[in-house]
């Protein structure tokens, strides 16, 4: 439950701290329900084949099981939720207010967004800004092609 103004403020604030940030979507029936923000100072590079290999190891069995329970049977499934990078969303966020420690802007906006069910339209608007993941994902050519296909035409979850 939120408003476009609150989501934009949250993302713009996050990307100010992490200019190479990446957004992944948690979707239900193709609509945005929640997002996962990944941020680090340096550009992010995710080796999808390496993650898949880890998911197949015994010590990662609980994680793999947990991912399967929510519809992700592979690393490709997981990373197909790519929703954009900071650079993709910059035009969409150009007028967003940055939240600072000494104000309660987001708390106020969150209250205004109570019982406002706009997750689907907000997520669709975000996705309309999404560019190619570029060098974000690495792996075999087949893996990257499969991932790209899933990003472009994700299955409904």
Image (cartoon, helix red, strand yellow):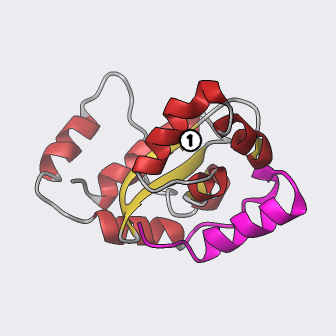
The answer, for residue 90, to whether it is visible in the render is no
**For the magenta stretch, what is the residue range?**
129-157
Residue toward you, 12 or 144? 144
Q: Is residue 37 above or below residue 148?
A: above
- Residue 109 image position (x, y, % from top left): 22, 46
Q: Find the residue positioned furthest to the left.
A: 115
Image quadrant of residue 15?
A: top right
Image quadrant of residue 32?
A: bottom left
- Residue 38 image position (x, y, % from top left): 57, 39
Q: Find the residue positioned furthest to the bottom.
A: 153
Residue for point 74% across, 40% down: 53
Kindly state the secondary structure of the residue where label 1 is placed: helix
Give the labeled residue for mark 1. Answer: 15
- Say few, some or many: other residues with alpha carbon within 10 Å of mark 1 (under 14 / 14 to 19 / 20 or more): many
Q: Is residue 91 magenta?
A: no
Quadrant housing the C terminus: bottom left
Relative horizontal placement of residue 137, taking residue 30 as reference (left or right): right
Residue for point 47% across, 49% down: 68
- Residue 95 image position (x, y, % from top left): 45, 56
Relative horizontal placement of residue 29, taking residue 17 as reference (left or right): left
């Amino acid at each position: 439950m939120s408003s476009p103004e609150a989501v934009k403020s949250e993302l713009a604030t996050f990307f100010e701290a992490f200019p190479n940030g990446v957004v992944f979507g948690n979707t239900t029936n193709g609509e945005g329900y929640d997002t996962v923000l990944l941020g680090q100072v340096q550009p992010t590079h995710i080796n999808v084949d390496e993650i898949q290999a880890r998911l197949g190891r015994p010590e990662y069995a609980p994680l793999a099981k947990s991912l399967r329970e929510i519809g992700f049977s592979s690393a490709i499934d997981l990373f197909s939720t790519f929703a954009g990078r900071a650079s993709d969303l910059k035009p969409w966020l150009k007028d967003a207010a940055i939240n600072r420690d000494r104000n309660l802007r987001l708390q106020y906006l969150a209250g205004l967004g109570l019982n406002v069910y706009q997750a689907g339209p907000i997520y669709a608007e975000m996705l309309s800004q999404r560019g190619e993941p570029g060098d974000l994902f690495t792996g075999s050519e087949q893996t990257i092609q499969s991932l790209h296909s899933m990003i472009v035409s994700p299955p409904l979850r």
